[in-house]
Amino acid sequence: MRMARQALFTLLVLLVIPGCAGLLPKPPQFSQEIPPSWRNLHGSDNDLGPAPDFRSWWRSFNDAELDRLVDQALRDNLTLAQAGYRVHAARELAWRSQASFLPNLSVHTIAIPNPTGTASYLQAGPDVAWEIGLFGLSHNSNEVAKGDIGLAEADRQAARVSLVAEVARIYVSMRSAQQRFLLLDQIVQTLQRKLALTQTRMQQQLATTTELHRAEAELSQAQSALIEPQSAITQAQHQLAVLLAQTEPDLSLSIVALPPTLRDLRIEQTPADLLRTRPEIKRAEQAVLKSAGERGLAWADLFPKLTLHGLLTYSFKEGGKRVGDVDGIFSIGPSIDIPLFDWGQRRAALHAREDELAASLLAYRQAILEGIAETENALALNERLRQRVAQEQITITALEQADTSMQAALRLGLADGISHADSTNALLQAKLQLVQAQEAHSLAFILLYKALGGAPLPAADAAQ
């Protein structure tokens, strides 16, 4: 009869207490108006080429070496590997959170003397405990665990986005530095010829010392300018080695090659796509979900907690009379923890969680605004630099025609070698400006797809 009454009491508790769960307030909702299209997107999209694949956008450069470096970095990068382990750890801890509301079986032992001190006993037996996750306790624990997983996954994807962008940026800068070095070396050779001609004219009293000193200064400046691309090449090679988890730079990168260039491309992503592609927004979203779960846990702490216990204990007499007697007892029933008065500690914790939830909602909104602004700036910069590249190409065409005319005049004796050297130097300087403009345009394109969150998904997520 006693066990029957305990079972009936437990059943009533399980039926009545969950009804109070309807008192749980819903977390505040957040709606953010997002513009339907980009303000700074190039207007004549229909005249441009195909849009790059969002998950492999760097292939738009059509550079096999860059493709190889990105693939190797995604496979070997240590930062990305660390992020992968953190995702795995978060998933393992999520299972731990779910298992805490499943029945747990343990074995306990304890040695105690009797109150009279005439005998000692060893108690041992299995113990079953099952905590019932009422008032959203189990659900919100799972939500917090899923939020931790989401945060880890967002951090891993952010690492992939940053890694791909960094490899592409460093590679483009390295190739551009190699091209700048070649052009600067040609400028040095041209100015050396000009200096030699000026010295000859000086000996013939056809040039002034001012012209000689000016030619010497121009040559010195050009030779000094060679240091910058040399340093940039060395630095880029070591940076790539770190990203590829290598102790030494890749020797194949020392072979000079033309920098990758872009053609006009169409952008198909919309501002709304940022909500599912930009890792910073995904992270802010997961932070909101986690904060909502933590608020739910604080709310559940205001209500009683129920744990079902089952215990089978055997008592062995170790000392005293009749050593070796064994007695057993079985018990089952609920354990209820009812909060009555705690000086407002639990209410304070709930209010704190509500404030944290409100802050995370504002952070989510801030992440959206920052993502839109960063993408808009990248779009505007990309278009301005595209126009700059086109203008530099026009300048080179005009200077090439002028240099051709100068060569013809030189053959006819209507111009001297110094004038031809100045014409060649002007053309080389314009080509140098074009290389820098193309590099800036490529870097703006990389910045754009980094702002959009473009990067391949992890293999497991891509399969899903």
Image: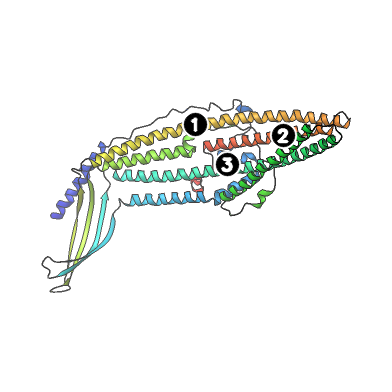
* Disc on the earlier residue, 1 or 3: 3
Residue at 60 percent of width and 29 percent of height:
383
Q: Residues within 10 Å of mark 2 (few under 14, many from 20)?
A: some
Q: Is residue 222 above or below residue 35?
A: below
Question: 11 or 212, which lies in front?
Answer: 212
Residue wearing tag 2: 429
Q: Residues within 10 Å of mark 3 (few under 14, many from 20)?
A: some
- Using residue 375 as the reference point, say whether residue 191 is left or right of it: right
- Using residue 325 as the reference point, say whether residue 460 is left or right of it: right
Q: Is residue 95 above or below residue 286?
A: below
Disc marking residue 372? 1
SS of the residue under disc 3: helix
Q: In front: mark 1 or mark 2?
A: 2
Disc marking residue 1? none
Residue wearing tag 3: 56
Q: In front: mark 2 or mark 3?
A: 2
In percent of width and height, residue 112 lies at 18, 66
Question: 429 or 246, which lies in front?
Answer: 429
- Using residue 407 as the reference point, say whether residue 159 is left or right of it: left
Residue at 45 percent of width and 45 percent of height:
153
Q: Is residue 116 visible?
A: yes
